[in-house]
Amino acid sequence: EIDKYAPLAPTPGSGFSDSHPLVGIIMGSDSDLPVMLPAARILDRFAIPYELTIVSAHRTPDRLVSYTRSASSRGLRVIVAGAGGAAHLPGMVAAMTGLPVVGVPVKGSSLDGVDSLHSIVQMPRGIPVATVAINGGMNAGLLAVRMLGVGMPHLFTAMDEYLKGLENEVLGKVEKLAE
Ligand code: RP5
């Protein structure tokens, strides 16, 4: 089962390529990859094992079912799903698993990504998808880290340090401006 969803792209520097992925990063098309790679880079940074692959709600519906139905038993704890246009992927995943799903609206060529945003955020009662901004792959990765951090103290601490880093970055700029 795991081999079937082998990573689409290598995860340089993750050091976890052979271990069980905790996060599944999926997308409707390889054209979504530039938006979804920042999520993978965040997981690399926090040394969280993940898998990254294409699952299309419309073009590979059987794969969508088998991927999602097996996700929790394969050890995944969070699914980050990105899609553009009539972006049904994150919602359909949330319909088939109790795992938390982070949805990434991908900006398409005609409607600026607002179509994807609405498709993903406007879920019916009972089936939530945690939706990030249009093309918000990086924040989706960070949200996955926060979700895992609830049960993994070292990740919680690492997230605190990440926030401290952001704060110091801004304070450094403030100081520079004052010079
Ligand atoms: C969606 O359609 C994909 O998620 C992608 O954002 C969009 C366009 O797909 P391609 O035609 O580029 O494969 O399903």
Image (cartoon, rainbow, N blue to C red):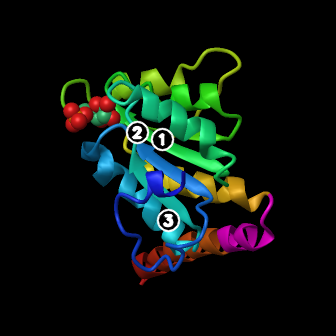
Residue under label 3, please give it: 42
Which one is nearer the viewer's eye here, 123 or 169? 123
Q: Residue at x 44, y 58 (%)?
A: 6
**Which tag, 2 or 1, sits closer to the chain's start?**
2
User: SS class of the residue under badge 3?
Assistant: helix
Residue drawn at x 57%, y 67% as measured from the top left: 49
Q: Which mark is residue 55?
A: 2
Depth check: 5 or 117 in front? 5
- Secondary structure mostly taken by the magenta-highlighted segment of the chain: helix
As displayed, is residue 18 above or below residue 144? below
As displayed, is residue 136 above or below residue 91? below
Q: Nearer the viewer, mark 1 or mark 3?
A: 1
Q: How far, Cα to Cα, is label 2 from label 1? A: 9 Å
Residue 78 shown left or right of residue 18 in the figure: right
Q: Are the residues flagged by discs 2 and 1 in contact, CB closer than 8 Å?
A: yes
The span shown in magenta is: 151-160
